Image (cartoon, rainbow, N blue to C red):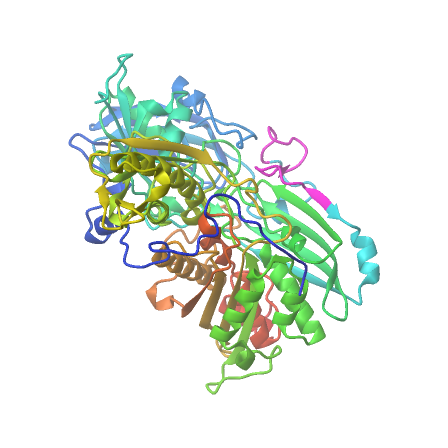
Amino acid sequence: MGETSVWEPEGTNQDREDFKVVGTWEHPGRQSWDMVSGAAKYPSDLWMDGTLIAMALRSPYGHAKVKSLDVSKAEALEGVKLVLTYEDEELASMPQRRPSYYEFGASPLLGDEAEFEGDEVGAVVVAINEEVCKKALDLIEVEWEVLPFILDAREAAKPGAPILRPEMNPDSNMTGNTFGAAVEWELGSAEEGFKEADHIEMIDYGRPMWSQFRPMPPAYFAYWDNDPWGNPDGEKMCYVTNHAHFPSNGPIVSAFLGANSYADKYRALSPYMAARYCDFVEKRGAQFAPVLSKRLGGVPVRCVQTRRQSFDAAVPQTYLSVRIGFKDDGTLVAVQSKNVHQTGARGGYGDKTHGHLVLPPNAQGFKQTVCPNIYSEMGYYVTNGACTTADPGQPMYEPLAIALAKIADVLKMDLTEVIMKNIKVTAPSLEACMAAGKEAFKWDEKWHFAGERTLDDGRLHGVSCRPAASQTWGMISYNINLRMGIDGKIYMPYAEALIGTYWPDATQLVIAEELGMKPEDVIVYYAPNYNNWQQGDAADRGSTCTWAAKEAAVMLREQILAVGAATLGVTAEEVDLIDSMVTLKADPSTQVPLIGLGQLAVGYCGKPKVPFQTDVIRTMNMDFCEVAVDPETGLVEILDYVCAHDFGKVIRPSSAIGQIENAITMNSGRALREELIWDEDTGVLLNGNLYDYKVPTIVDQPNVVSVPVETRCGGGAYGSTGVAHAHANPALVGLAIQNAIGAFIPMVPYTPDKVLAALGKLPE
C-alpha cells in the first residue's frame, strides 16, 4: 500500500460515538414541503403588479464591437419605458467594486464589445412585456465591427494567434489562474525519475466545454421600497431575487458591489435558486435589475434569460499530455505533465476575466501518489465561446486515473492493486473504500484485461475503477449564531440560496445532537436580513459547515446547563440535557423544561486549524464502472456504477446518498453526450437547446449503488467530509470503454462516432 498517515481530529466531541440524531433518517428538509408541493417561489416565479421586463441587446457574432448605435426608434415604441446604452455613465462605471479574485482586465457591466455570440452588449431595454422588449431590440440600429474569435484553447496558444485581450496580456492569450496556481512547478527531478523507470508511456486526454447547466434559466427581479426596519438616511431598500450560494458572488453581492453600496441596503426575496453546481458566473441581470428599477422610481423590474441564452456559462475545455515513468512492480517514479487550459471570455461581474475557481486538471493529483518526481506546466488561455466557470468535481484526478489504468494495462496487473500501491492516503480510508466497493461491484468476478470479454448479446464488456479524494473542508471560517428563545426552541438564522446541498438540515441535526435536543426543537430558518451566513467554501458545505455548528452548540449547551442547574439548585455537572429537557443525572425523573429559562445566545466563527488536505489524503472514495459497448453502432450503456464513498461520518443520509446520485447522473451525461458545439466559421453556438444539447433524463439514469464508508477522517463534524464533487469525473467511463474495446479514446464525450473510430470502423 502507498504511504499512509494518521489524521488527528480537531475540535470538541469529534470522536463522539453515541449518536441519537446524526446519521438517522426521517428528517424532512426545512424547505422540502415547499419544493414538492409547488409552494416554493423561485426567481422566475417572482412577479408583482406593475412589473416591467428588461432585455439586453445580444451579439449575433462570435466576437464583435459596436461601431455605432441608434436607439431612437426603440425609445419611440409604445410600451417602452427606458433604453440605456453602454454610454450611460452609471452603466459604464459598473461594477464599481468586485471580489479580489477577479484581478484581471476589469470591464464595464455593459460595454461596446461582445465577448461571444449571445453576449449582452451595447444597450438594455425596459418595457411593459417581453413582446415589446423584443420589438424594441429589433428596432435598434447597430453597426458591428466583427472581430477575430478563438474557440479552442489550443488555437489561442499558437504563435501568431489574434490577441483577444491585449489589456490583460499584450503579447499572447495566456493569462493567470484566479487562485494564482503556479504555471510551472516541479517536485524532485522528473528527468532523473525517468532514468529510473522501467517503462515510459504517453497519455493524451482532453475535454470540450460543457454547459454549466441550470435546471431553471437565470432570473433576476428587483424593486425599491421603504425598509420596514427604518431608513435612518432616508434611502429606500432594494429588494433582490435571492442570496448567493458562494460568499463573494450571487445576486445580492453582485448588486451592492456593482453599485458600490453595502449589504444592508439589499434584501433577498426568496431562499430558492434551483440547483446549481459550481456555477460562479452570476449573470449581468443581477446588476441590471436594481439599476433599471431605481431609474424608473423603484418599480419592479424582471430580467430573465431564455433557455438559449442560458448556455452562456460553461466548464472550461482542457487538454493534457502526460508522460509517465513506472517500475515493473507498478510504482510511479516520474510524471511530466503539460496542460493547455481555457479561461473563457468573462467572469461573473461583467469583467473580462474568467470564473475559474477550482484547480484545473493538471498534475496536482499526482502529488497524492508515492511518485517522487513530478513536473507540471500549465497554460491558461483566453478564448471566446461563453464565460467559463469553475471546474466541477476533481478534474485533477482524471489524468491520475488514466495513468494508473495505463500502468495496469502495460504490466497486466489488476487495476485495484496498482491503485493501492501508488496512492498516499490517511489510513484506513482508501483501504476501506476499496474493500467495500469491490464487494458491492463484484470486482473480482467482473475484472478482466482490455478486450477480453464479450457479453451474450454480442456487446463488448468493460470495467474500470478510479480513486479520488473527497472535499474535506472549506477555505474560510463559518459564522454560526445560535439562540435559545423563551419558548425553549433553538434558532439558527441563515441567508443563502438553497441549491440542493441541504446544508441547513445537516447543521440542524448536528446542533440537536450536541445540545441533546429533539430535532424538531432546533429551528434553522431563512432570515433575509441576516447577511452572509455562509462564509466558506461553496463545495460540499453539507458536511463542512457542521464543524462550526458543532462548536457553537457545545458553547450554548454549557449556558443552558448552567441556568437549568441553578433552577434545580445544583451544579452544572449534576445535570444533563436530554430530549430538550434539563435532567438531573442522579434522578432522571427530575426535569426542567427549557420554556421560561430565558433567552441565551452564542456566536461562533471558525474552522479547524488544518482546513485543507495536505499531500497525504484524508478521505477517499472509489468509483467502479461497468459498461457494454455495441461494436456495430458504437453505443455505450453504463450497466453498473458503484460509489464507495468515505463520508467520514454520514450526517444526513438522504442528502448524502442524493449527492452521489446527482453527481453520477451528471457525470454520465458529460461522459457520453454533453458538449458545446460552435460553428467554426462564425462562432455561433449550434446546440444551445435541450434537443441538441443532450443532458441525461430519467431514462438515461445509470444504476448507481452508493456504499457509505465511515472512517471519521474528514474535517467536518465528527470527521465528516464532502460528497458530490468527488464523483463528477467522466474519465472513468472512458476507462471502462477502453477496457471493453482495447483502445483509449482521448477526448470526452465518448460518443458513438468516437467509439467506432477507435474500433477502426470509421476514420478518426
Q: Residue at x 53, y 81 (%)?
A: 445
Left or right position of 345 against 561: right
Task: Give the quadrant of residue 84.
Answer: top left
> Residue at coordinates 47% horizontally, 68% vertically from top-left?
642
Percent x, y of residue 131 = 23, 38
Q: Residue at x 52, y 39 (%)?
A: 475
The reply to whether residue 460 is in sight is yes
- For the residue pair 249 and 506, the one nearer the viewer reads as 506
- Asked whether, in this view, residue 42 is left or right of residue 113, the answer is left
Q: Nearer the viewer, residue 326 or 64?
A: 326
Spot occupied by residue 309 in the image (x, y as percentages of width and height): 37, 44
Can see residue 140?
no
Image label count: 0
Q: Quadrant of residue 452?
A: bottom right
User: Residue 136 location in percent, x, y?
Assistant: 28, 32
Relative placement, left or right, of 763 versus 625 is right
Residue 582 quadrant: top left
In the rendered image of this protein, does residue 264 appear above or below residue 597? above
Quadrant, the C terminus: bottom right
In this picture, which residue range is highlighted in magenta?
164-185
Q: Residue at x 78, y 50 (%)?
A: 188
